[in-house]
Image (cartoon, helix red, strand yellow):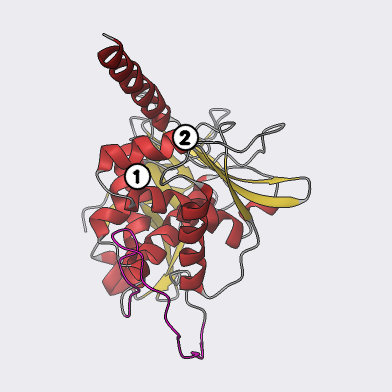
Amino acid sequence: MKKPLLFVLSLMMVTASFAQITIRIGRHDAPASWSPATQQNFASSSEAQQYAQDIINVVGLKPNFEIMASNSVDNAAAVTYGGKRYVLYNPRFIDALVQRTGNKWAAISVLAHEIGHHLNGHTVSGQGSQPTVELEADEFSGFVLRKMGASLQDAQAAMKLLAAQTASRTHPAQYDRLAYIERGWRNGGGERMNDVAVSRPQPQVQQPTVRTQPVYRQQTRTNTPARSMASVIGKVRFNANPYAQYFVTNSYQLVQVQNQQVRTIGKVARINSSQYPYVIYDEQNTQLLVNSRGAIVTRQGRQVGQMSAYNG
């Protein structure tokens, strides 16, 4: 009876570990202390280090962090501690994620997301998780996974499993996160590295390359009105600027049309509330709620605008 019992217990441990996956990735406050994990498998330090190096190689930068397996975090986190930067990950979480998705790309995408926080400077602000910085890290993850050989399905596998359907104060909704991963993945098209999640390439002598522009760039915020207006689904009016033209696109971006240019100024996300089903937020994480009748209000209840369907 010992072997069946051990099997059941181990299965329960994996299930319990995977239950932690519902916790959003990306906590940026360091635990008071942590100790290295002793589990040796994919999540062992040496292999994780190699995948981290592959990610760094894609963007052509030097790592400004250390990567460490730790049981002190529920899933994974980019943190600063004692003046140093770390990417911490829980080996049991990583293993459960790999088992559930069927390949290692999901785990690599988690590492890429956290590394993106460090490389984009998110962990030095001290402001913790915000929707805009999470989307930047998602876009970075999609970009590097494309370069490493992942399909779009592989790049999105972890987020399809982990992200909440609705947005919160700190994290965007799943729809937005998948959209930004796809944006990064498409921007990463072109020459790719070997599929590192399937087999480890043998060391080769590479010729030096000259980079004439940054590998990773944010998508421009302006566009031509004709192209952008074709995707408009909503119209927004703000009391403080009633004659300005604001619209919501089918990717839930809030844009302003001015001087024949379209500028993205924020995002619209669905939240789990029947009274206020949507929230509007910008890069400074300023938030406005949209009630079921389309009225845009502050968190103090003062109406500042109106959102309605766009009829062309």
Q: Is residue 207 part of the magenta span, yes or no? A: yes
Few, some or many C-alpha atoms within 10 Å of disc 2 (few <14, some 14-19, many ≥20)?
some
Compared with residue 22, is residue 196 higher up or lower down, i.e. above or below? below
Question: Which amino acid does the dot numbered 1 rest on?
Answer: Met
Residue 40 image offset from top left, x and y in percent = 47, 41
**Residue 168 bears which disc, if any?**
2
**Nearer the viewer's eye, disc 2 or disc 1?**
1
* Mark 2: secondary structure: loop
Q: Residue at x 51, y 64 (%)?
A: 53
Q: Earlier in the sequence, mark 2 or mark 1?
A: 1
Using the rendered view, name the quadrant where residue 254 is placed.
bottom left
User: Residue at the top extreme?
Assistant: 1
Q: Residue at x 27, y 72 (%)?
A: 227
Q: Residue at x 52, y 79 (%)?
A: 214
Question: Which amino acid does the dot numbered 2 rest on?
Answer: Ser
- Quadrant where the N terminus lies? top left
Q: Residue at x 24, y 54 (%)?
A: 153
Residue 132 image offset from top left, x and y in percent = 51, 51
* Mark 1: secondary structure: helix
Residue that mark 1 sits on: 159
Few, some or many C-alpha atoms within 10 Å of disc 1 (few <14, some 14-19, many ≥20)?
many
Question: Which span is picked out in magenta?
Answer: 191-213
